[in-house]
Amino acid sequence: GDGEFRIVEERWIDAASRRVNKHAVITRSGQPVGETSESVRLYSFEELSALLRGVGLEIDSVFGDYDGAPLQAGRPRMILVGHRTRTHAEPR
């Protein structure tokens, strides 16, 4: 019908830069009214662990989804739970 909005979204993974990219175009009645893009870097567990340790965070648990499944290939997420180490704690 008249005045309908339509969103066309394209997602792709750039293996060379290890990024997930998304571009969306919003149209109303066939005319573009907006667009948005995002690009998110993919990190391996080893990379992310090293970055977190470098800023004083220790990992306690790792999950592969919001239901608490173990991290393994094919899981949709990498969820890390941890705490700040004593050596990097804020002064009291």
Image (cartoon, helix red, strand yellow):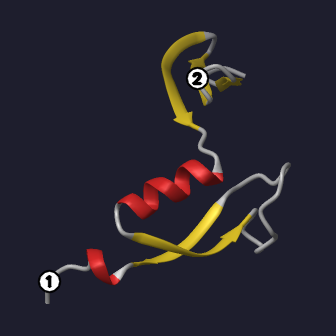
> In the figure, is residue 57 to the left or right of 80?
left
Q: Which residue is mark 2?
A: 17
At a point 64% along the width and 46% down the height, the residue shown is 44
Q: Residues within 10 Å of mark 2 (few under 14, many from 20)?
A: few
Which one is in front, 35 or 16?
16
Residue 23: where, in percent of width, then height? Answer: 59, 22
- Quadrant for residue 79, please give it: bottom right
At a point 80% along the width and 69% down the height, the residue shown is 70
Which one is in front, 47 or 32?
47
At a point 81% along the width and 70% down the height, the residue shown is 69
Among the two numbered marks 2 and 1 on one chain, the one whose residue lies closer to the N terminus: 2
* Residue 43 appears in the rendering: yes
Judged from the image, the secondary structure of the residue bearing numbered disc 1 is: loop
Q: Which residue is mark 1?
A: 91
Residue 84 drawn above or below residue 77: below
* Gap between marks 2 and 1 measured at Cα: 39 Å
Which one is in front, 15 or 11?
15
- Quadrant for residue 86, please give it: bottom left
- Quadrant for residue 71, please give it: bottom right
- Name the amino acid type tagged 2: Ser
Task: Kindly give the residue lying farthest to the left in the view shown.
Answer: 92
